[in-house]
Image: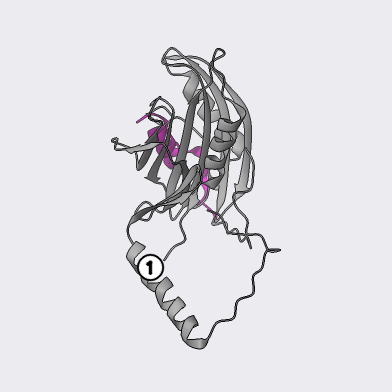
Amino acid sequence: RGVGKMWSSSFVASPHFSSPPKLSLFLSSSSSSSSSFPYQNLNKFLCFAQNPSSTIGINFSKRQLNLSILTLLFNGFLLDNAKSISESGDLQRYNDFKGGFTLLVPSSWIKVDKAGANALFEEAETRSNNIGVVVSPVRIKSLEDFGTPQFVADKLINAEKRKESTKEAEVVSVGERSGSQKVYEFEYKIDSTRGGIKRVFSAAFVSSNKLYLLNVVHSDKPEDPLDSSTRLMLEQVLHSFDALPLT
């Protein structure tokens, strides 16, 4: 299944595993909410941070407070082990409780089922524009055990160049951010015999010995280039990709 499979194999068989993988912990005071198939690939920005300057004072009676807590607990119970989508303007929050990940997706894009994908969303008018997530078991505990962001980017772009359909592949940016764990982010361009020039935004992280891969693919042809508003939306999707908190 393309690079999703390549990634899993590389993580398991990487020569970097001459010594047992080390466990890295990343703590943050801020909260985080991340292709054409098969999966191919993996910039640099912090996901989401709560605004500490925004505070609202509300007076609760003891009874009202207890009722509020019960309501929250009950709603959490209903959502447990389920998938949910909540509205947020042009983007929606998609939570996959079984897969253990969360991300924003365009509200007009359609969720479809496809073998090998834990989640796949396609633009209704142009289905080659899509967002996909693959989750695979791995032996490492963090991406740093596998290599640096640049090391990973080199592996991804080389995998793209080996494809018969790839005419040209170029890394645009490489970076990392801290969510509930370290997340690597990449942007690159592909010129392919299948669909022409495409812009790809990818993210990857490891949580609970599972590799989480996000691919966001959009056409970026010279005659119809990726506009700034669509690019901003796709970057929001990229930076929103994160693990769901363990319950």
Splitting the image into 4 quarters, where does residue 186 fall? top right
19 inside magenta stretch: yes
Q: Nearer the viewer, residue 231 or 11?
A: 231
Quadrant (top left/top right/bottom left/bottom right) for the C terminus: bottom left
Locate residue 247 relative to residue 183 in the image: left or right: left
Residue 217, percent from left and from top: 47, 29
* Count of picture labels: 1
Identify the magenta region: 1-22
Residue 140 visible here: no
User: How many neighbours does mark 1 have within 10 angstroms: few (below 14), some (14-19), or many (20 or more)?
Assistant: few
Q: Nearer the viewer, residue 23 or 93?
A: 93
Residue 42, percent from left and from top: 52, 35
Instruction: Determine the residue positioned at 59% across, 32% down.
Output: 229
Residue 90 visible here: yes
Q: Residue furthest right?
A: 53
Residue 142, percent from left and from top: 52, 50
What kind of element bears circle 1? helix
Q: How is the image coloured?
A: one colour
Q: Nearer the viewer, residue 204 or 85?
A: 85
Mark 1: amino acid: Asn
- Secondary structure mostly taken by the magenta-highlighted segment of the chain: helix
Is 202 located above or below residue 220 in the figure? below
235 inside magenta stretch: no
Is 104 located above or below residue 124 in the figure? below
Locate residue 189 relative to residue 5 in the image: left or right: right
Splitting the image into 4 quarters, where does residue 108 fall? top left
- Would you name the residue on which mark 1 appears? 75
Residue 140, percent from left and from top: 47, 49
Quadrant (top left/top right/bottom left/bottom right) for the N terminus: top left
Q: Residue furthest bottom?
A: 62
Instruction: Determine the residue positioned at 36% across, 42% down.
Output: 119
